[in-house]
Image (tube, helix red, strand yellow):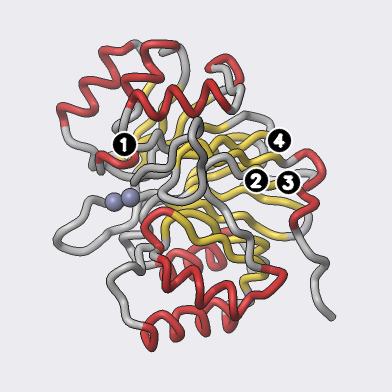
Amino acid sequence: MIEPMDIKKLRITVIYDNFGGNEGLRADWGFSCLIEGPEKSILFDTGLDPAIFSNNMKLLKISPEQVDLMVLSHEHGDHIGGLPAFFRMRTDLPVWVPSSFSDPVKAYIRQSGAAMEEVDDAPRRICRQAATLGKMSSGLYWPEEQVLYIATHQGGIVVTGCAHPGIVKIVERAKSVMGPEILLVMGGFHLATLGEAAIRRIVDDFKRLEVRHAAPCHCSGVLARKCFREAYGARYIDIGVGTVITGADFKPASP
Ligand SMILES: [Zn+2]
Ligand SMILES: [Zn+2]
């Protein structure tokens, strides 16, 4: 469906996150990142607060013209809240959303002038080296969520919003629909309410699934970040607002 990209061209900039930041660059509850290097540059989610989102974009020197298309993981305020700020700067681009987005949000996107792509259950190619894994169910209480996948010569990069469908289920799906090698899983893992034993089981699942690097942020929780850091060592990538991930951050596959 998609082809691997050259990892040397990869550049992922975290625009919005609960962690990191400084006096200028503001940390806040939510998530957004810009993925450059694939055929199309992808803005994944937009954080919660429009003012913080546009402030961070400006400080990170990201212009709206750098973005070719937008992928929104799920309909929660901390992922789509910054949308009005982006649309004030630019609307002539495709926006990929789960087809189960509510009518008012769909109408808002359409009326802005953006081209909306509605994603059903099936995985779909977004550009030459990126795909959505398709919308996944998040159970009774949370909206359906889509996950972004970037193919590289060293394995797939999985980018999650809140991982409401379950972070392990998401990794399993990525492996089954896109291929067995997972270079990195990054984003919100939604583990903040779990105790240490439950988190350790998830870390063990990551090892069993041979996920090579882990970068939990946003709603992953402080304890999960600690457990992943301990288990992954040099293959833990510490991210927060302002972090830039490039090909140099990855360790060679172990023998
Ligand atoms: Zn979230
Ligand atoms: Zn959420």
Q: Residues within 10 Å of mark 3 (few under 14, many from 20)?
A: some
- Amino acid under disc 3: Thr
Q: Say which mark, if any, is on residue 2.
A: 2
- Amino acid under disc 2: Ile
Q: Position of residue 250 (x, y in %)?
A: 75, 59
Q: For numbered disc 1, what is the local secondary structure?
A: loop
Image quadrant occupied by the C terminus: bottom right
**Viewer-nearest of labels 1 and 2?**
1
Q: In the figure, is residue 190 to the left or right of 69? A: left
In 3D space, how far apart are the residues under numbered discs 4 and 3 (Cα atoms)? Answer: 10 Å
Q: Residues within 10 Å of mark 2 (few under 14, many from 20)?
A: some
Q: Position of residue 164 (x, y in %)?
A: 31, 60
Instruction: State the residue position of label 4.
Output: 37
Q: Say which mark, if any, is on residue 246.
A: 3
Q: Residue at x 50, y 34 (%)?
A: 25
Q: Earlier in the sequence, mark 4 or mark 3?
A: 4
User: Is label 3 in contact with label 1 (beta carbons under 8 Å)?
Assistant: no
Instruction: State the residue position of label 1.
Output: 48
- Amino acid under disc 4: Gly
Question: Observer-nearest residue: 26 or 75?
Answer: 26
